[in-house]
Image (cartoon, rainbow, N blue to C red):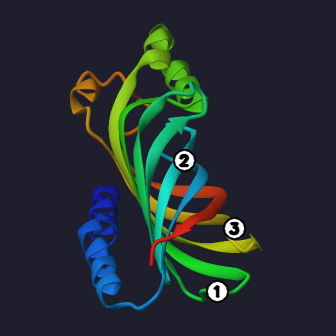
Amino acid sequence: MKTKNYIKNFKRIVKMPAVVFFLFAVNTAFAQDKIALGGSVTSQTTGSGFGSSVSPSLVLSLGRNSVTAGMNFQNLHHNLSGIRGKYEFILNPEENSELFLFYDVAYHYGAYFAKNTVAWETFISPENKNYFNGVKLRAVEQHIGFGINIRIWNKLKIFGAAGAGFYNTLDKEKYASNIFQYRELNGCTIMLMAGIKFNLKRIK
């Protein structure tokens, strides 16, 4: 019961994508900063049971703000599992080391289990090993956190970040038979990510 209440309260804090993007839109409307189009390649891992993944994305930056949108590929099977978006707010822009806050959301429409998830599920139910290796799930992940950009060239940055959040599995019918004994239907997670960012073109 306490776990359910904790997840419910945490969702109230994290689950505000509409508010986040509304604030970005308002800031964009009134800001006088330059607008730039760029790209990023991010490697991330979370506690959702899907393992590590890579996301090549487009980045729209305006002053302290940036919005990222791209695809999500799982490292284990090299499959396209879904899409991923991110909002960032830089606390100290134009410095060689920039601290930022972020909100990250991912929608998986076909994600495999990570090796360790398969191993634990198989340990509990060895007769279902083949099923655990091949099953795909739909899920939504959301995280908030902080990170640091390090400028290594005028238009190129490397970054690292950490956050906390939760995941919701959308395929509830696959959990109805109680075949999954290790991975929960929904849960709280942590997120670690690192990657590179680069500006391609100044729009304004």
Res 157 label:
3
Callout 3 environment at 10 Å: few (<14), some (14 to 19), or many (20+)? Answer: many
Looking at this view, is 173 or 159 the one in front?
A: 159
Q: Which residue corresponds to mark 2?
A: 56
Say which amino acid is labelled 1: Glu
Looking at this view, is 56 or 180 the one in front?
A: 56
Res 52 label:
none
Q: Which residue corresponds to mark 1?
A: 94
Q: Tell me the residue at 34%/57% (across/down).
A: 3
Callout 1 environment at 10 Å: few (<14), some (14 to 19), or many (20+)? Answer: few
Residue 153 percent location from the top left of the image: 76, 71
> Which element carries disc 3, helix, strand or loop?
strand
**First along the sequence among labels 2 and 3:** 2
> Which element carries disc 2, helix, strand or loop?
strand
Q: Tell me the residue at 52%/57% (across/down).
A: 190
Residue 184 percent location from the top left of the image: 38, 39
